[in-house]
């Protein structure tokens, strides 16, 4: 019998088209008679916008429209998608076009539509914004000072979030040791290799809008667009397309997601917009940037008694669709995989004259893991304890589970239901050969080289809340089709859903056609974010495929004159167990579900079933990052020599895909740890608007990454037992590199910020009192 | 605007004529005028390499070349790699080693690796890493790409699934 598809590293169903160059990305979509849109973006970080001179652009032959805020009354502002809504954020939402005020370089000022993209760029250069400069605010901590120049009428502090449980003040008062550090995470973002883009086509006769290029949360975006355009949702269709990476930033509702369809409807012509890379780096969400003070109260033996945390979160110029979820997650995920009896945290969500922020893979976890693991390293050094031993001392034990924390994560308190935290640490150390890495580093330091090792433990979160729908159908040729919620972002969701279906219907995954994220095929859905699609879309597909299989067995039993319980589905056929010569092709079973036959049985026609999977609890995967690095004290360069990730995934539907997520996540995390940061000059001019300035790791910088995926603790809350796999690869990378660099240089409490720049390394190397080789 | 030139290119063995503005990039000519949308644009400033095609056998950033500069040249794109519908060994190796996720950078890496293996059929691991470091992938972390090129070079059989 054929082995189960779930749990096996089957080839991806997406590969055949992508390897031939036959993928269909948004720029591959062309509509007859289409026009091209170009955004005119603000060149100043903070200014009053007193007017826009568009006459010269409008006079250029081939230009069809130059839209500015004054043409829209009122100017729509883009709503928040994600809770929490502790208080209204309306005063900080971004208008689709700058409305009397410019708040960051790159803010859309006008939208030009022309016959071709070259002409649209020519015309955009003829649009002139009339500006009266205002003082800029570029630092989150300074932004919330009373004297700071104000970006918004409500001030620069969108919100102060406070999260607490237990008696933290008492614990700090009684503690034998209090360790406090200040740390900083740089301004990173996802940088998918495909920039954003949209094509919108409006059918006037039917009042129907069709859009290509939306992804991630198509149903939510359809609802927003319907409201902003005053259309009915059922008159808007979002079509699925391939997407060149998401990482949190792609697929949210941005100003262009309004402007492109709005202009397509207004001009009665298809409109296409493809973001260029220079735009992307100032227009698409930034993320991560925080300054924070974090303190731990420790008993004499290293027992962690309480944590205290103050965050200044640099959200950029507006609150976008993610609301304040990143600072909230940063607070709520700080205790991580440890027993922390008391906690109090406060986050100042500050607005500054920079590109607005949203989530980026591992939001809140990359930042929280960096702060907490830096604190534990500092505490271990101060208490004279081994860094690994201090962690082992404080990890959640089996007796602690299930573990409840009164900290909200996307609306629900933290509930860690299953896990073997110490077992993961032991396994990661053993499988990686970490103790050999430590000995090797010591030996190399004895030769005068600056080599060191680090460890970072992280808690991840995935899925949680909401629902997804799916339909599984078999036609009379035996072809299986799956339509499900979720979105293709390159993660391999089509393959995962094909695997789940294959096992229920007894067909090969490669023969199953999967479509996700098409609003006409699936009426409602949550989308692909928060590592939720295997859990939710996978859960829905599992339920739908089970139901379709049950129907197939019932109908086949009639055709074969056997009992439904004796029918086995395998190899594309339904056969009677024990006498396999009595069988019928799945397509014939489907054919027997024709309308007339089904009607006679009092059933709906078709071998098909649709199901909804709802309300799976949040899952909490966890894992360990280990690294060995070599530092060049002269140049400040850091080379990652060895890297390993241990990860608990509950159930791996496709181990190779899980490994791919971990390794790819590590590459992004290492980028943030060593290379990536958006920098601004004193006037708020972005200094990183190309890949020559915003540095992405290449094959020369990313080391081989070893992985060990464990399935110790399947999630009881979903049919597959799966936990999300998308973000654990990134979570610990900043923390582990910082630890290893300190170890390499023989310094403590020295690496307080990522990325660890060559300048910082040179300064640390110069400051250290004990040379590395001593 | 009216600076239009008639050029002739051979793309994947097929000679084609096209009228282009002098400022039109080869990438746009291939994608939008000739329909070879497998060549992707990731940065349009020559860093990411997603648009890598072979021009007279040399790996070239199609975003940094004007169409008129490619007049009379032989262009090879990702669409020319498969034969009779069958993936070639390099493409097979990419699938077997999970060397692609979103697939956007993949055509560029495939063309880069094609040129490498023609020039150096048995590269060392370091030579593969150095060559592949010309392009950017944001999904895979590269090691599966390096393994796939290694496998294609060594003629290693793709693992069964």
Image (spheres, rainbow, N blue to C red):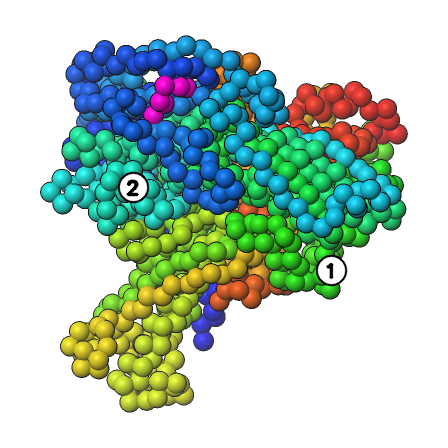
Nearer the observer, B62 or B136: B136
Tell me the quarter of the image containing the C terminus of chain A. top right
Chain of the residue under label 1: A
Residue that numbered label 1 is attached to: A397
Q: Residue A292, image x and y in percent?
A: 66, 32
Chain of the residue under label 2: A
Would you say residue A695 is visible in this rendering?
Answer: no
Would you say residue A557 is visible in this rendering?
Answer: yes
Nearer the observer, A480 or A469: A469
Magenta portion: prevailing SS class: loop
Nearer the observer, B17 or A110: A110
Q: Separation of disc 1 and disc 2 at Cα?
A: 49 Å
Q: Verify whether residue A699 appears in magenta.
A: no
Residue that numbered label 2 is attached to: A227
Q: Are marks 1 and 2 on the same chain?
A: yes
Q: Above or below — where is A92 with respect to A569?
A: above
- Magenta region: which residues? A97-102
Q: Residues within 10 Å of mark 1 (few under 14, many from 20)?
A: some
């Amino acid at each position: 019998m054929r082995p189960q598809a779930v749990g096996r590293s089957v080839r991806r169903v997406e590969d055949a088209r992508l390897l031939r160059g036959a993928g269909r990305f948004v720029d591959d979509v062309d509509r007859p008679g289409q026009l091209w849109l170009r955004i005119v973006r603000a060149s100043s970080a903070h200014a009053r916008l007193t007017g826009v001179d568009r006459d010269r652009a409008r006079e250029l032959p081939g230009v069809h429209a130059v839209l500015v805020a004054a043409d829209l009354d009122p100017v729509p502002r883009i709503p928040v998608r994600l809770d929490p809504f502790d208080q209204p954020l309306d005063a900080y939402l971004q208008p689709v076009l700058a409305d009397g005020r410019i708040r960051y370089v790159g803010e859309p000022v006008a939208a030009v539509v022309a016959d071709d993209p070259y002409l649209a760029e020519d015309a955009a250069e003829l649009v002139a914004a009339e500006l009266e400069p205002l003082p800029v605010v570029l630092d989150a901590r300074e932004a919330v000072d009373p004297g700071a120049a104000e970006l918004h009428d409500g001030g620069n502090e969108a919100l102060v979030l406070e999260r607490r449980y237990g008696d933290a003040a008492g614990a700090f008062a009684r503690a034998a040791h209090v360790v406090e550090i200040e740390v900083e995470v740089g301004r990173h973002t996802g940088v998918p290799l495909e920039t954003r883009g949209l094509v919108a086509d409006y059918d006037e006769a039917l009042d129907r809008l069709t859009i290509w290029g939306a992804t991630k949360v198509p149903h939510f975006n359809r609802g927003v667009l319907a409201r902003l355009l005053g259309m009915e949702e059922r008159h808007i269709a979002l079509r699925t397309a391939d997407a060149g990476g998401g990482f949190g930033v792609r697929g949210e509702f941005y100003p262009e997601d309004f402007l492109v369809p709005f202009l397509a409807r207004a001009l009665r012509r298809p409109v296409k917009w493809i973001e260029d890379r220079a735009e992307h780096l100032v227009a698409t969400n930034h993320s991560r940037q925080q300054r924070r003070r974090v303190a731990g109260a420790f008993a004499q033996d290293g027992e962690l008694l309480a944590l205290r945390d103050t965050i200044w979160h640099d959200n950029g110029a507006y609150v976008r669709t993610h609301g304040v979820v990143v600072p909230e997650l940063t607070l709520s995920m700080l205790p991580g995989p440890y027993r922390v009896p008391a906690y109090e945290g406060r986050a100042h969500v500050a607005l500054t004259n920079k590109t607005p922020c949203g989530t980026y893979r591992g939001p809140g976890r990359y930042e929280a893991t960096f702060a907490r693991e830096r604190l534990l390293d500092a505490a271990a050094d101060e208490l004279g304890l081994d860094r690994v031993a201090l962690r082992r001392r404080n990890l959640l034990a089996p007796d602690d589970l299930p573990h409840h924390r009164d900290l909200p994560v996307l609306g629900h308190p933290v509930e860690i239901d299953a896990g073997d935290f110490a077992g993961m640490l032991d396994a990661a150390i053993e499988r990686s050969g970490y103790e050999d890495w430590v000995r090797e580093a010591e030996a190399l330091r004895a030769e005068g080289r600056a080599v060191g090792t680090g460890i970072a433990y992280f808690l991840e979160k995935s899925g949680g809340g909401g629902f997804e729908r799916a339909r599984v159908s078999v036609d009379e040729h035996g072809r299986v089709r799956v339509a499900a919620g979720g979105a293709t972002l390159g993660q391999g969701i089509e393959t995962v859903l094909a695997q789940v279906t294959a096992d229920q219907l007894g067909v090969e995954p490669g023969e199953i056609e999967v479509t996700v994220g098409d609003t006409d095929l699936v009426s409602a859905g949550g989308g692909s974010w928060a590592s939720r699609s295997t859990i939710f879309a996978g859960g829905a597909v599992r339920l739908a495929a089970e139901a379709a299989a049950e129907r197939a067995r019932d109908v086949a039993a009639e055709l074969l004159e056997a009992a439904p319980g004796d029918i086995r589905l395998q190899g594309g056929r339904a056969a009677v167990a024990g006498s396999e010569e009595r069988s019928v092709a799945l397509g014939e079973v489907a054919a027997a579900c024709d309308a007339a036959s089904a009607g006679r049985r009092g059933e709906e026609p078709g071998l098909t079933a649709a199901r909804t999977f709802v309300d799976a609890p949040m899952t909490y995967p966890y894992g360990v990052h280990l690294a060995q690095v070599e530092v060049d004290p002269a140049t400040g360069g850091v080379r990652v020599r060895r890297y390993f990730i241990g990860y608990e995934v509950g159930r791996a539907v496709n181990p190779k895909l899980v490994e791919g997520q971990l390794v790819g996540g590590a590459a992004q995390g290492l980028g943030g740890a060593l290379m990536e940061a958006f920098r601004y000059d004193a006037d708020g001019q972005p200094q990183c608007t190309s890949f020559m300035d915003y540095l992405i790791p290449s094959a020369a910088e990313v080391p081989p990454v070893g992985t060990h995926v464990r399935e110790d603790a399947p999630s009881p809350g979903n049919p597959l037992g799966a936990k999300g796999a998308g973000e654990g690869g990134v979570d610990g990378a900043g923390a582990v590199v910082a630890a290893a660099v300190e170890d390499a240089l023989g310094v403590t409490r020295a690496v307080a910020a990522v990325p660890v720049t060559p300048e910082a390394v040179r300064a640390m190397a110069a400051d250290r009192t004990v040379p590395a080789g001593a | 605007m009216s600076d239009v030139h008639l050029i002739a290119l051979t793309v994947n063995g097929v000679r084609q004529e096209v009228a282009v503005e002098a400022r039109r990039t080869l990438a746009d000519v291939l994608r939008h005028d000739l329909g070879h949308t497998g060549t992707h644009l990731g940065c349009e400033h020559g860093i990411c390499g997603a648009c890598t095609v072979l021009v007279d056998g040399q790996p070239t950033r199609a975003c940094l070349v004007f169409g008129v500069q490619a007049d009379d040249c032989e262009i090879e794109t990702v669409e020319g790699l498969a034969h009779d519908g069958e993936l070639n060994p390099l493409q097979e190796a990419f699938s077997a080693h999970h060397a692609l996720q979103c697939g956007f950078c993949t055509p560029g890496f495939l063309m880069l690796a094609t040129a490498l293996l023609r020039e150096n059929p048995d590269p060392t691991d370091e030579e593969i890493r150095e060559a592949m470091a010309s392009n950017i992938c944001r999904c895979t972390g590269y090691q599966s790409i390096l393994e796939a090129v290694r496998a294609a070079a060594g003629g290693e059989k793709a693992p069964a699934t």
